[in-house]
Structure formats: structure tokens, C-alpha cells
Amino acid sequence: MKRFVRLALLVVFVLMLVAGGLVWNHYRLASRLPDGVLAGNGRLELTRIDVAVQYPGRVIRLMAREGDNVTAGQVLAQQDTTTVDAQYAQAQAEQARAAGAVGRAEAERQARQAALDLTRDELRHARTMRAQALVSDMEVKQRSTAVDAASAAVTAASRAVDEARAAEAAVQAKMAQVRSIIHDMTIVAPVAGRIEYRVVETGSVLPPGGRIFAMLDPVDPYMTIFLPTAAVSRLKVGDDAVIALDGMERSIPARLCFVDDEAQFTPKYVETASEREQLVYRVKLCVTPAAQRALGGMLKAGMTGEGYVRTSPTAGWPDGLTRHGMVQ
């Protein structure tokens, strides 16, 4: 029983220390902030991209490790394409057969067309001879019927050519699809960035959408901070901001790029003013493009620091920021 009481007292003491630290940090920030500037603690975050396979298969090669910097389009992994290669060979055989069918249908159409031309010549000759009373009306009628039959044969042969060409086009589309699958089974980096995690190892069999790597996109790093309701009501997207990271002497220019439309850590709907005062909103401060280019790869996910937002363009920044200067 005494042991339980001691443990409970220890937990209460730790919670009091944490709460006291948070309160102290809040008043520490508030006490050194000029009017028109809001601040909060946070971590630098980078956009995380999952590199996954589009088609099921076995991973036979991995060409990147955790922490590697990769360029856009760089090959990261290779899936086994043995089965798909066989499908492509089959499609090639079908394409050759379809091309032969087109050739045969075209030759048949040409033969039918030649027969039609001959029957038309015979009909004209029969009509000339009938005008001279050298043949009967029955002979002319027979020649006319032969022309109609030959014309119908040409039409049927032309449709057979169209069908053969359509079949050939379908096989060519199938070949293009299989080539696309083979191409997509070589996994490349979608953007330039850094490999954060390698999810699988060589020999793993993955389903469609199975992850191989998790990448960090160094473009558009941002810090998430939380501000109370009264502060958020004075903010607008595009406000000037500054990020001061622990261990970096110079501060980083940023812009307010996002304000959440829902409160955090409290019920969704509140009724009393005292409860509304406890609401905090998630705010994102995005590093400016110029600062990204100036800092290169110095910005890393997880770096801690403080974010400052200026609600008035005439407000001055805290002394700690101006003393060390800002990245230009």
C-alpha cells in the first residue's frame, strides 16, 4: 500500500513539473514578445512521400539506403519482371499473327475489287452488244447481277480488313500496356529528396501499393505551432513569420501558410466563454523559397525551435531574432 502511494505521489509530481514547465515557457515567450507578435513552440516538418509499387511482384534489387539523398527519376528498386516479360513475348506473337491477318484480308479485298472491275467491263460490253441486238436482255441482266454480287463481295472484304486492323490495334495496345507495366516495375524517385525509411528488404513480395521507401521532400519545409483562439482571430494567411531553430544562429524567414478551421485538444463544440478560451488552433509557418535555397540541406525534419508570427506589419521582432540576423 505504501509503495502504491509513493508511486502515485511520484506521478503527480512529474505531472506538476511538466505543467509548470509549459506554463513557464508560455510566460517566458509572452514576456519577451513585442506587441503584434505571437509565438509558439514546434518542430520543423518536411513533406513525407511514400514510394510504393504499382503492380504486385517480388523486389529483386534495392538501390538506396536510409539517409541517402536521391534525385528525381533516380532508380531506387527493381521488381522481378519474368512473368510480365513472358506476357510481352506472347503479345508480340499475337501482333505478328494480327499483322498476317491484315495482310490476308487486304489481299482478299484487292482480289474482290479486281473481280468487280472485270464484271463492270463485261456489263458495259453486254450493253453495247444489246444495243446492236447481238445479245438478249437476259444476258445484260445476268451481267448486272454479277456486278451487284461482286460489289457486295468488295464491301464484305473491306469490312474484314477493318476488323483485322482493329484486332491488330488491340494487340498493339496490349503490348503498350505490358511495356508500361515493365517500365513501372522499375521504381524511381518521384522527386528529389532524402530516404527516411526503407520499409522492405530484397526478396519481399509486395501487393499493389506496397510501400518500399518513405522519402522526405526538402521543398516547402514548415513548422506547426498552436495558438489560442484570441490570437488566431488576428491572423491571416500570408502574414510575416520567423522560425528560430535550436542550434542555428540565424533565424529563418517564413510565411503563415495555413490556419486550421477546427480547434485542437478540446471538444468540437463548446458553450461557455471559459471553455472557448482553452481552445488552440494548429497553425503552419512555411519557410520562404529564398531561405530554402540559402540553407540547402541544413533544414531537417524534427528540428525543434520557436515560431513567431507578426500580426501587424509595423510590429518589431523580438531582440533575440534581430540580434543574430535572418537568412536572406
Image (cartoon, rainbow, N blue to C red):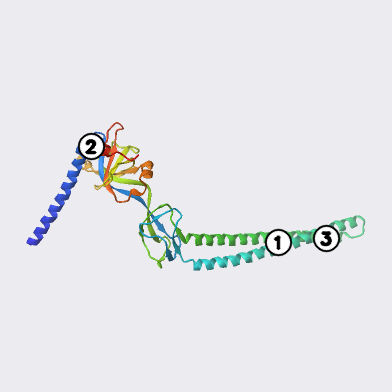
Mark 3 closeness class: few <14, some 14–19, many ≥20 residues within 10 Å: many
Residue depicted at 56% across the width and 62% down the height: 175
Marks 3 and 1: CB-CB under 8 Å?
A: no
Picture coordinates of residue 178, whole percent (x, y): 53, 62
Looking at the rendering, in which quadrant would you find the C terminus? top left
Between circles 2 and 3, the one closer to the viewer is 2
Left or right of 145, for residue 250: left
Amino acid type, label 1 = Glu
- Which residue is more in the foreground, 280 or 252? 252
Nearer the viewer's eye, disc 1 or disc 2?
2
Measured as percent of width and height from the top left, residue 106 is found at 70, 61
Say what amino acid the circle numbered 3 marks: Arg
Q: Is residue 13 left or right of residue 222?
A: left
- Disc 1 marks which residue? 106
- The amino acid type found where label 2 is placed reads Leu
Residue indicated by mark 3:
143
Residue 228 visible from this viewpoint: no
